[in-house]
Amino acid sequence: MQDQARTDQQDNDDARGPRLREIPLRLMVPNLITVLAICAGLTGIRLAFESRFELAVAMVLLAAFLDGIDGRVARALKATSKFGVQMDSLADIINFGVAPALVLYVFILDKVGSIGWIAALIYAIAAGLRLARFNVMAEREYKAKWQSEFFVGVPAPMGAMLVMLPVYLGFLGLELDRSFAILATGYTLLIGYLLVSRVPVWSGKSETRVRRDLMLPLLLSVVVYVALLMSFTWQILALTAAAYLCFLPFSASAWKKRYGTLTIEDDHANV
């Protein structure tokens, strides 16, 4: 009887999860990066409410960067876990949905009152729906061939970068009047739509190999881009957002040429 009671007590204790001292450090590192990403996103919101907008945008972009590397660190350390996946999803909603929406609202959308707030809400909800769809598709056993090359809709990290284009333009000296706020509101709704749309977006994850003779020019291009980004941050971010939007029709056209005989529903890949 006493043995059964001890067994039940042990089972009850185990059900509460491992103690902190029992978790290997390598398993904690990716989750610590995720927590730092959440802190950066929330700090960006605080800085926006304090009208320190450049730092606010920098913190949101830092959150996006940290959120992008935590999964890679986890795979490199062989420290992936279901707990980490859930943490990452929660961080994504804050960093790619809530934080950009609030920064944008405080910066410009509040000039059109409730309409601007509704646009910010719609974008944040669209980001959450986009992330939920991505998680569902990732868990499916069946994956279509094109899923290794294309996303369905604009990915949430790019959505966060795109939706803050009005902020970049404001930093470059564009007058923040009501007309600009109305345009920014419509633009916010457009990005929210692109997040939940069925537009095929090239993911860059294909296994196509880069020719050796192109490797050095490619690396040099990356170095030049980063150098320009550090020196002309807002100009380069604005150009990057505009270039990505221009790239979307070409991405959809490439998908149609390769897989145009199928619809996304027929390939069992949409929700």
Image: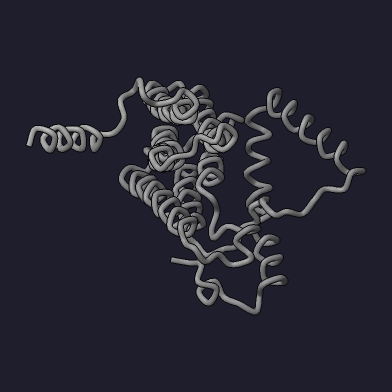
Q: Nearer the viewer, residue 97 or 165?
A: 97
* Lateral position of residue 254 relative to residue 98, left or right: right
Looking at the picture, does residue 67 appear above or below residue 139?
Answer: above
Looking at the picture, does residue 36 appear above or below residue 167?
Answer: above
Give the image location of residue 258, x and y in percent: 71, 70
Looking at the picture, does residue 207 appear above or below residue 145?
Answer: above
Residue drawn at 47 percent across, 37 percent down: 177
- Residue 108 location, quadrant: top left
Q: Nearer the viewer, residue 34 or 125?
A: 34
* Lateral position of residue 55 relative to residue 10, left or right: right
Q: Quadrant of the N terminus?
A: top left
Residue drawn at 42 percent across, 37 percent down: 84
Identify the residue at the far right of this view. 213
Identify the residue at the far left of this view. 1
On the question of residue 250 being in view, the answer is yes
Residue drawn at 92 percent across, 43 percent down: 213
Q: Nearer the viewer, residue 160 or 267?
A: 267
Residue drawn at 71 percent across, 23 percent down: 231
Q: Nearer the viewer, residue 201 or 142?
A: 142
Looking at the picture, does residue 183 appear above or below residue 256?
Answer: above
Q: Quadrant of the C terminus?
A: bottom left
